[in-house]
Amino acid sequence: MDDVQDLIDEREESRRWPMIAVVVVLIVALGLIAWDQRPWAASSGNESGLGMLADTSPRRAGAAPDFALLDESGERFALSDFQGQPVFLNFWATWCTFCKEEMPDMERVHQEYGDGLVVIGVNAGDSVEDGEDFVRKSGVTYLRLYDSDLSVTDGYLVQAMPTSYFITPDGTISDANFGFMVYDQMVEQIEQASQG
């Protein structure tokens, strides 16, 4: 009787292994599908309409990658909203001394060019409250957008603050500057972008 029971147990055991193998293969397949889709991962913001909207990196004479961020009042702005106008795009942070030093010149450019130029300051990683407290002391009125998760800052390959991009009316990057700029340098780059 024990031999019969052993035989039955062996048959059940031999049937169990293929079933376990099928379950393992299914789990691995579902895991790979889930990993590929990554619904839990922090995305570039496309689902919310914020962050990098293009999968390209910026390069001189190439199209400026589109992105969208919120300003201090929560209004959404995309770079593509300003197609047809030259754009002075500047990345800054509250801890950046040079950012603070170049802001008055950026504000001067903003005031002098008026509607002939869009000046955008993208804050890299600070809260809106901290950023607005910082710029209030500088008297800045140009458009300020907040990149709290650094997706746009990283997408624009920003390695140092401040970093500026100059974009032509057709959306092409005419030049970039990595570091502090003074008024005359800004004007020179803006004029090139405006003619581009």
Image (cartoon, rainbow, N blue to C red):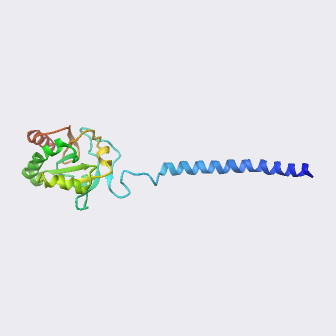
Name the residue at the left extreme: 112
The image shows residue 69 at horizontal and vertical percentages of: 28, 55
Tally of numbered discs: 0
The image shows residue 53 at horizontal and vertical percentages of: 33, 51
Q: Is residue 58 left or right of residue 120?
A: right
| Nearer to the camera, 67 or 171 | 67
Quadrant (top left, top right, bottom left, bottom right) of the C terminus: top left
The image shows residue 105 at horizontal and vertical percentages of: 10, 45
Q: Compared to 165, does 48 lie above or below?
A: below
Residue plotted at (12% across, 42% down): 186
Residue plotted at (31% across, 44% down): 154
| Nearer to the camera, 60 or 143 | 143
The image shows residue 66 at horizontal and vertical percentages of: 29, 50
Q: Is residue 83 left or right of residue 19?
A: left
Residue 194 shows in the view: no
Residue 22 shows in the view: yes
Residue plotted at (49% across, 48% down): 36
Quadrant of res 59: top left
Name the residue at the right extreme: 1
